[in-house]
Image (cartoon, rainbow, N blue to C red):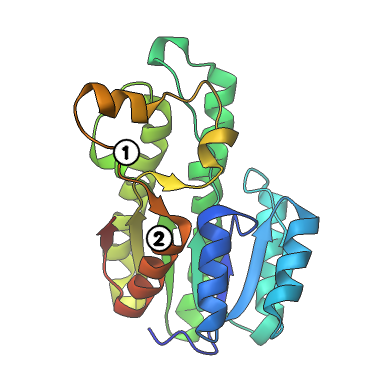
């Protein structure tokens, strides 16, 4: 898909991958709708990017917020060309120690939020003749890492929803894709629930170095995936 002049919604746009993707997409000429919970950071980013970038408060655990986000996005140009479901939270710890209330909250943000956003934009994309949904998953959904079972389960679910929807919607010219970043230099781990394992130390005991991407590297691949429409991309 050509990015220039497309209306693109980016959730989790106030930091990390979402912020880097917003900057990269703005440079490519997209009309951006930036979503997140930190209103001050959202407004500052929208002002910085200019070109009509819109900041919308959205907690992806809230269906009301997601409905408002979609409505505000449609006000930009009467269409939503790309939805990037990037917002998410993590959780670390052995499965037996998982707090089930925290687990449910993470499922709301990482699975039900993106799924509800998809349900809202799919009919609009069908009417307008097509569109794209890009769900940001994780490499943990392709592996089995100790202390990441709860978080990984949300990404396994997101993969299944995404790739099944891709098959269901291909005749409507609606592309659904999944991005799988590996460990990325963001505040994601710091903001995650539970105690973050020292993967650098684990790597040293195994004689390997932990490979870490920058948010900008992931953003570059997100742009490439939008342009190509590839089903999956692993960093």
- Measured along the vertical axis of the image, is residue 201 above or below residue 143? above
Going 47% across and 47% down the picture, which residue do you hit? 185
Going 49% across and 73% down the picture, which residue do you hit? 82
Going 69% across and 86% down the picture, which residue do you hit? 51
Q: Quadrant of residue 15?
A: bottom right
Q: Is 27 on the left-hand or right-hand side of 227? A: right
- Measured along the vertical axis of the image, is residue 168 above or below residue 188? below
Label 2 or label 1, whichever comes before in sequence order: 1
Q: Is 177 on the left-hand or right-hand side of 101? A: left
Given residues 70 and 58, the one toward you in this image is 58
Query: Foreground mark, 2 or 1?
Result: 2
Label placed on residue 162 = none
Given residues 42 and 201, the one toward you in this image is 201
Q: Residue furthest top?
A: 96
- Measured along the vertical axis of the image, is residue 13 above or below residue 199? below
Give the quadrant of the N terminus: bottom left
Q: Is 211 on the left-hand or right-hand side of 35? A: left
Q: Dot 2 lies on which element?
A: helix
Q: Residues within 10 Å of mark 1 (few under 14, many from 20)?
A: some
Label placed on residue 140 = 1
Q: Is residue 91 visible?
A: yes
Q: Where in the figure is residue 127, as x and y percent of width and height? A: 50, 82
Q: Dot 1 lies on which element?
A: helix
Label placed on residue 218 = 2
């Amino acid at each position: 898909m050509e990015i220039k002049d497309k209306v693109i919604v980016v959730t989790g746009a106030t930091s990390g991958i979402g912020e880097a993707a917003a900057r990269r997409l703005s440079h490519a000429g997209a009309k951006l709708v930036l979503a997140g919970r930190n209103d001050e950071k959202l407004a500052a980013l929208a002002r910085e990017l200019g070109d009509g970038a819109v900041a919308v408060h959205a907690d992806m655990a809230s269906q009301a917020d997601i409905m408002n986000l979609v409505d505000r996005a449609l006000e930009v140009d009467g269409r939503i060309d790309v939805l990037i479901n990037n917002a998410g939270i993590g959780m670390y710890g052995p499965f037996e120690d998982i707090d089930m209330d925290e687990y449910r909250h993470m499922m709301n943000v990482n699975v039900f939020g993106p799924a509800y956003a998809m349900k809202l934009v799919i009919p609009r994309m069908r009417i307008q003749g097509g569109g794209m949904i890009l769900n940001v998953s994780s490499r943990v959904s392709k592996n089995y890492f100790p202390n990441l079972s709860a978080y990984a389960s949300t990404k396994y679910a997101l993969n299944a929803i995404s790739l099944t929807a891709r098959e269901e919607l291909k005749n409507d010219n609606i592309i659904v894709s999944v991005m799988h970043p590996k460990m990325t230099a963001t505040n994601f781990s710091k903001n995650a629930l539970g105690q973050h394992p020292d993967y650098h130390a684990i790597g040293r005991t195994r004689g390997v170095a932990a490979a870490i991407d920058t948010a900008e590297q992931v953003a570059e691949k997100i742009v490439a995936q939008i342009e190509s429409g590839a089903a999956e991309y692993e960093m």
